Amino acid sequence: MNHIVTRFAPSPTGHMHIGSYRTAFFAYLFARKHNGKFILRIEDTDRNRYEPEYTEEIFKVFEIIGIPYDESYIQSENLPRHREMLQKLIDEDKAYISKEEAKDGSGVIKDIIRFKNPNKIVTFTDLIRGEISTDTTDLGDFVIAKNINEPLFHLAVVVDDHDEGINYVIRTDEHVANTPRQILIHEALGFPLPQYVHLPLVLAPDKTKMSKRKGAVPVIEYLNRGYLPAALLNTICLCGWNPGTEQEIFTREELEKIFDLDKVQKAGAIFNEEKLNWFNREYIKLLSDDEKKNWVMKYLPEQLKELSDDMITKLIPVIIERINYFGEIKDFADQGEYDYFVSKPEFAIDKIVWKTDTLDQSKTHLQKVHDMISEYSGDWTTEGIKSVVWDYAESVGRGNVLWPFRYTLSGRDKSPDPFVLASILGKEETLARISNILNK
């Protein structure tokens, strides 16, 4: 196999979604698998829709998500070369200037450059879809430039691919219809044809085409929400590609070795955010304690950052246990989920009563818990506190004891178990909260 050069050529006209970066990652993996080169090219020639912040976003996401490229190009910088090739086609009578009225209804006559279609059948072999033939007669003499200084997509992409040595064009199958035009231009310019690979689309959960114009979540948004880059890459890669084994968690280096275009499915692949959440939780488990703390601190509300370092360290496993991604920390905080770590909860006293118990019975159980842990002098850990209270709870009813104990500490219907809460709050605060309720 010749030295492989692939590329990803996004247009910076909006936020890019999962489907776009999957194409980029597949092109990258295919090149790395064969010790080839991967190029990132920003196709910014659509100046009416071009926004510079989207170019910045593309480079930023590539850096964060971990798709390294060997070279990068900005298409608009290639204009002199595009102009040269347009003139070559005109001089060789393979394209011509057509004076046409502008489509905006202004009546202005403009010089449009059209490709002189040889009206032939174009056949190429796609590595996923197989042999594809098109009668180009129906295409007519198609437009390749608005004028000599404004080349359009079909001309620019052909010239750039040739000049940058691209010999494997990996893109989504919505570009299949563009391929015959581009092959005609390749042949007219005397350029060798690349090998074409058209990937099936990534679909939204409703099986419609995922599109940045239809509200698909941008990858930058997933990163901002606190999804781990490695989890995103893993999810992206398994969207329409199957390694043929039971393994689901892969490092990028592992994927570079085993990726195979033959295992890309031919039908569209549905992107499932629930699967992304599963992958992200699995990757969170793989983080070191220091990494977990760094991620949590990045999203932890300011009032919680004021807690002692010891409390935060104990709180981190509680936080991580419930989240799919780190941005949920703020969501839970906004809902008051962590308020009881910062201040004593306020609630109606009858809330501490377990089912058929009376308020007096619940008070008795709380008093017993208070007395037992007050006398406890061992390590103030979840297991240590549990060892003090558990036998009593077993003897009179776990719910009867643990519900008022937990509710007294958190004031919420759902929260970590009372032993976890007590271990985080500390002995002094735990006793103070129980005493506060008993006094009421």
Image: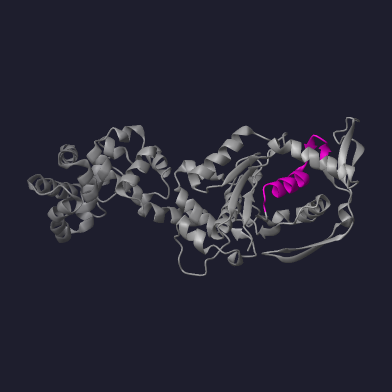
Front-most of 153 and 311? 153
At a point 57% along the width and 41% down the height, the residue shown is 58
- The x and y percentages for residue 124 are 76, 62
Q: Is residue 194 left or right of residue 283?
A: right
The verdict on residue 351 being magenta is no
At a point 42% along the width and 41% down the height, the residue shown is 331
Q: Quadrant of the N terminus?
A: bottom right
Q: Is residue 346 left or right of residue 172?
A: left
Front-most of 128 and 225? 128
Q: Is residue 133 left or right of residue 348?
A: right
Is residue 32 in view from this perspective?
yes
- The x and y percentages for residue 433 are 19, 39
Query: What number of labels is visible?
Result: 0
Q: Quadrant of residue 114?
A: top right
Q: Does 241 sit above or below residue 21?
A: below
The verdict on residue 148 being magenta is yes
Q: Quadrant of the C terminus?
A: top left
Colour scheme: one colour
- The x and y percentages for residue 284 are 38, 51
- The x and y percentages for residue 184 are 82, 54
Q: Does 233 sit above or below residue 15?
A: below
Front-most of 57 and 425? 57
Is residue 272 in view from this perspective?
no
Front-most of 436 and 387? 387
Write down the region rendered in magenta.
145-166
